[in-house]
Image (cartoon, coloured by chain):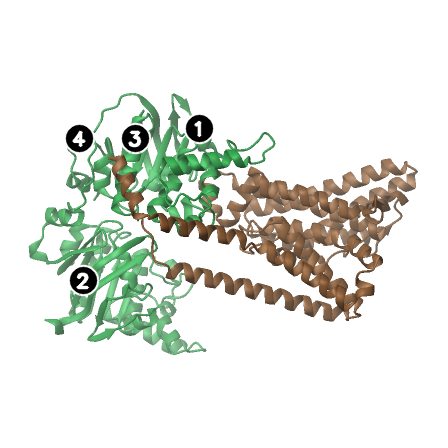
Amino acid sequence: MNKDIQKKTKQTETPQEENRMRRLVKKVHLETKELVLLQILIGVFLLMSILSPGRFLSVYNLQSMAYQFPEFGIFALAMMVIVVTGGINLSITYSATLSSILGAVVLVSLNNLGVPPLVTIVIGVLVIIIISIACGALNGLIVAYIGITPMLATLGTMTLFEGIALNITKGGAISGFPDMFQWFGNSAILGIPVPLLIFVLVIIATYFILQRSSFGAKVYMIGCNPTATRFSGVNVRKVLFLLYIYSGILTGFAGIIMASRYNSAKESYGYTYLLQSVAAAVLGGTDISGGFGKVFGTVVSVLILQVISSGLNIFGVNRFITDVIMGMILIVVLTINFVNNRMEEKALLSKKVVTA
Amino acid sequence: MAQNMFLRMHNVSKTFPGVKALKNIDLEVEYGEIHALIGENGAGKSTLIKILSGVYQPDEGAEIIIDGVVQKTITPLDSLKRGIAVIYQDFSLFPNLSVAENIAMVSRVEKRKKIVNWRETNQIARSALDKLGLRIPLSKTLSELSVAKQQLVAIARALVNDAKLIVMDEPTSALSRGEVESLFSIIRNLKEQGISILFISHKLDELFAISDRFSILRDGKYVGTFGEDELDDDRLISLMVGRKIEYKIFEKRTLVDPIFEVRNLSKAGNFKDISFTLHRGEILGITGLVGAGRSELAQAIFGLNPSDSGELILEGKRLQVNAPEQAVQHGISYIPENRLTEGLILKKTMSDNICLTVLKQISSRHGLIEKAAQNKLVEKWIEEMHIRPNIPNMITSKLSGGNQQRVVLSKWLATDPKVLIVDEPTNGIDIGAKADIHQLLRDLSEQGMSIIVISSELPEILAIGDRVLVMRRGKIAATLDGKNLTQEEIMKEAL
């Protein structure tokens, strides 16, 4: 009986048809969005180099870029991991600055008390990481366990973190760290800037957690369909909670780099990165409705945006015009993505129904 | 004859991706007729109504004539303008607005009124209620009314819109006996005014009390239209359930080794005082009408919808199940009824879907997925379940219904469950694949797996259920031995 049915199913699927489907799947694999992004990156890099050879390709400019984009890149990854779940984390920059401000208070006090710099810095960094974990945990609690929409939840915590930070700083910046603290933001190992090294570590960690681990597999599935994921025996709340904590830790790293680079801590540092992070994640192929998105794409997009903004800066283009151009690029890319998806869907619908 | 027909639907078919929901349906409703549309769950009644109301477009070749006008296509607005009003089970009213506003809403929208004219609103509502001979305070907020009164408001709203055919989907399901009587007198009153009623219900006595003619659907096909005098209960049931589908009937077994026991399980509003025992290697069928609490019960056992009270005992041990992950740990698996939204993650690949329940198995100590182990597992299940095409990276939304269900089965069989609960396992898949899945469930049970099959399709229950548990209104109506059981016996307990 069983074998008869097996034969029947086999007969309905001719070998040609199977080959065709195989090819279809392969083709999709080759046309990865990442490849296109990489080409765009090379393209804008060459364009900027040609338009402004002396200055764009100067050691000074390349180095200053290498110190600038890691903090942006880390924010973008902190944002991207949450966007993959179908959510958004609006609190990233204020979570970073609140952590670094509390860390700064500790750094300055211990420094003034005459504690050895190394001990001060270790304690200060620990404080920053712990506070960023707490910020992430608060987000996770509200989103995963209370069930408030991520956008509203993180809008709330964003305001909360900003408010607490302002109460500590009274609107000013906190400075007076041990000199050694600048190592995180302003020095290099074997010519490679430390912020860049931290960013590379963050990229590797995020890649393994999101794209290689069983935890990451659950994250992607939750982003596609939380109900079906829950029906599959996955503790969706726990996964979301932990992921918000991870996003929080990343903001802590960004906070350390920023505090070190500016040698101070202030609540407004990095706030322009918030929406740019969303832009980088989406430009990198992360689906804003969740379920899809890769570390590589996000990182390449960060580089693309950085190259464009540095390039425009070198040409002397007004900062505000740069914003206009960035906004337009984003809209164009999103429109192309949207139209592409629409056409794919239409093609799918018009296709004949395959029955087993 | 044709002149008497308000509605003529001819050769109406509807295909959804992977399944043909309606096949060449005919339906004719006369002016001033009370017409019953009946069929089992999933027979295609709702789909047909949705075509009539313009929600779905029929496949090519359908002929629809409403009030003498041939309709090439129907949009929801066309349907309204032609005088078709559908009153869904939830009435689609606005609970926060007043009775008058609810009744006058449609005409207000239709006239594109930007400013509310209260006098006109009240007038419209008053005259509609007068037509029905009803006295309901116009200014009352809808949510303050009883369900029966809300339904009457929905009917009044249909009248405002000049409805010539009112479709009522299970209108009596939430009404008391007296309320049903008054609803019926209103329906008869409408009939006097020349308004046609298309009545959808499961309650046979009510159908016979009010209907002029009966149209019967079965498995998306049109069985026929009969006058009231041509039918009785038994004939109607046998026409509804039919005998066309012939599954292989497996030999029924009597098993004695209890493995899983449900004791006095209750959940307010869902089910009450459910007790049964599942034996090792047994297939227990659970059936009943939609809303009898079958899926709610299954989801309670699986921890999705934890029960208020009662006990679950697996292999002599009392279980604590408040979340699906606990159920999975204990070896209970649940394959949900809705494959597309609950069973599968459609945008992801077969491989992703199959592995989701067994990520631990294919991961290293550090929680990293081992590609080789993943591929091996996925290939094993594709092979074992004959999933076609056998491409692990195929997006599951592109598979046929039968193959999708095999992916869902694989995903759960991979967890090696002791108790497997399958909810409507062959819903929306074609007949060959159905038989395949029956055989598979039987094979699994012979290997010692204990299986609960929930199905509204009686031939399916009869084919594979060693015992059959019939639920009615949240309670167990009967536990029947699968040997020599007939559809009629089950139906009598379920209704």
Disc with the residue nearer the chain's start (3 vs 2) = 2
Q: Nearer the viewer, mark 1 or mark 2?
A: 2
Q: Amino acid at mark 1?
A: His
Element marked by disc 3: helix
Q: CA distance from mark 1 to mark 2?
A: 50 Å
Q: Are marks 3 and 2 in contact (CB under 8 Å)?
A: no
Residue that badge 1 annotates = B330
Front in this rendered view, residue A268 or A186: A186
Same chain for marks 1 and 2?
Answer: yes
The quarter of the rendered structure image containing the N terminus of chain B is: bottom left
Q: Chain of mark 4?
A: B
In the figure, is residue B366 to the left or right of A59?
left
Front in this rendered view, residue B288 or A213: A213
Disc with the residue nearer the chain's start (1 vs 3) = 1
Where B480 falls versus A202 (above or below)? above
Disc with the residue nearer the chain's start (4 vs 1) = 1
Q: Amino acid at mark 4?
A: Lys
Disc with the residue nearer the chain's start (4 vs 2) = 2
Query: Residue B130: percent from the left, percent from the top?
Result: 26, 71
Quarter-wise, where is residue B434 in the image? top left
Residue that badge 3 annotates = B443
Residue that badge 2 annotates = B26
Element marked by disc 1: helix
Q: Chain of mark 1?
A: B
Q: Are marks 1 and 3 in contact (CB under 8 Å)?
A: no
Disc with the residue nearer the chain's start (1 vs 2) = 2
Direction front: furthest residue: A16
Q: Are marks 4 and 1 in contact (CB under 8 Å)?
A: no
Task: Give residue B234's mark.
Answer: none
Residue that badge 4 annotates = B483
Judge the density around disc 2: few (<14), some (14-19), many (≥20) Cα neighbours within 10 Å. many
Q: Colour of chain B?
A: green
